[in-house]
Amino acid sequence: MRRRVISGLIAPGAIAALLASGGASAGASAASAGASGGCARPTLTGWAELPAETYVPGSEPSGSALGTEPVNGVRPPFPGQPVQGVSGVVRNADGSFLALADNGYGRKETSADFLLRVNRLEPDFRHGRVRAAGGGITLSDPHRHTHFPLTRPDRVLTGADFDPESIVRAPDGTYWIGEEFGPYVLHFDRAGRLLERPIPVPGAKSPKSPELEPGEKPNLGGSKGLESLAISPDGRTLYPMLEGTVTGDTPGDLRVYEFDRRRAAFTGRRWTYRMRTPQLSVADLISVGRGRFLAIERDQLKGDEAAVKKVHLVDLADRDGDGLADKTEIVDLLNIANPRGLGTPGPVFRFPFFTIEALTVFDDRTIGVLNDNNFPFDATRVAGRADGTEFIKVRLPRPLGGCADGRTRAIIGT
């Protein structure tokens, strides 16, 4: 595994048709970044926030198992379903994003009234706002594919049934979701209806797994399932990645599986991603070319204590032959140049959230990153005030692709 720290990557060519989506401010920052040379830091070119207390209009109350005492200024139960916990995004052609919510309030026992949902978000980087728009999807299992009892008789899925953490959209318009309780790979149609029986990850069972036999011990930690799921550029292959180490594997090593989408089955092939230390986590994996991905590697800290929040370029080719995926740091999310003072004042922008779980690619010079705000429990920016969901755009000093062998292309809208 090659570990390198660089400020940018060289690409064989830009995706010209999509450069406009980066916006005028991104273009201006690109010029200044290019002029500063190869050692320039990535630059913040956009910041927008979805307020913490954002609810799905007309939705059912939620959070009844959280008690009635205020949590970071918000008193449960809540008047509706919170638009929170962003764990993965899919970019739409109109510039909006489908944002996957996680299981709600962190545990099965507290999340039975949190309805699993993919919300539609519209970022407005010019004015620093994210709007929760119509057109979201509520997940359900009307055709009874789930092989264990569900919480609700109407078979709308809740945070007590599954913990969805990663999402991709296939060329046929269906959605594949990585889940943590099993862990499972889940397949949904465009309307959010489960299409087939949940597919368990080979050789991995969490403490909450319905697949555990009587007396069987789990071999994967809680909340260490499929935090990441990527799709190949041709749409044929999925790459599910565990967040935690399976018992018996080298501590800090994570399994990256190959999954044949057309057969809806794991192929038996897998790779190993080694974290910097076993105490870290990897959240989100998105394709930027054949066998190449962006991934977030982060610690379990937040605020001033946060020390490791990185975006890496990952190459499964293992070009140095050590049996591990190669990785190259491309962004330190705690050290982003902020010449325009976006989001927070000062020349350096920090994205110091405990859970940073969603990546997207705008063009071959610009990536997007979102935090999971763990509503209402995290208060990172202001003590005692629940975090919102921040959406940042980061301009790279050089285009995505290149640094290893110049073959990476950005994959947009998957």
Image: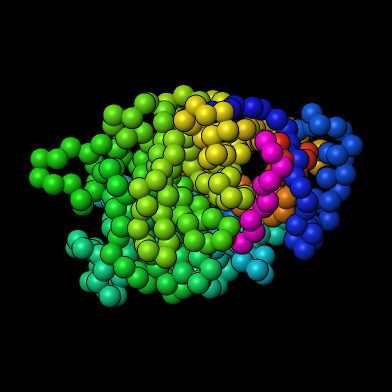
In the figure, 278 relative to 314: above or below?
above
Question: Residue shown at 53%/40% (left/top)?
Answer: 316
Which image quarter holds the N terminus? top right
| 260 magenta-colored | no
Question: Residue shown at 88%/44% (left/top)?
Answer: 31
Nearer-the-camera pick, 365 or 323:
323
Residue 134 lies in quadrant: bottom right
Is residue 30 visible to us here? yes
Relative placement, left or right, of 268 versus 403 is left
Question: Residue shown at 37%/26% (left/top)?
Answer: 251
In the figure, 407 relative to 37: above or below?
below
| 405 magenta-colored | yes
Q: Position of residue 127 (x, y in %)?
A: 74, 57
Q: Position of residue 144 (x, y in %)?
A: 24, 71
Nearer-the-camera pick, 51 or 92:
92
Q: Which residues are magenta?
A: 404-413
In the figure, 156 relative to 387: above or below?
below
Relative placement, left or right, of 202 versus 405 is left
Nearer-the-camera pick, 172 or 58:
172
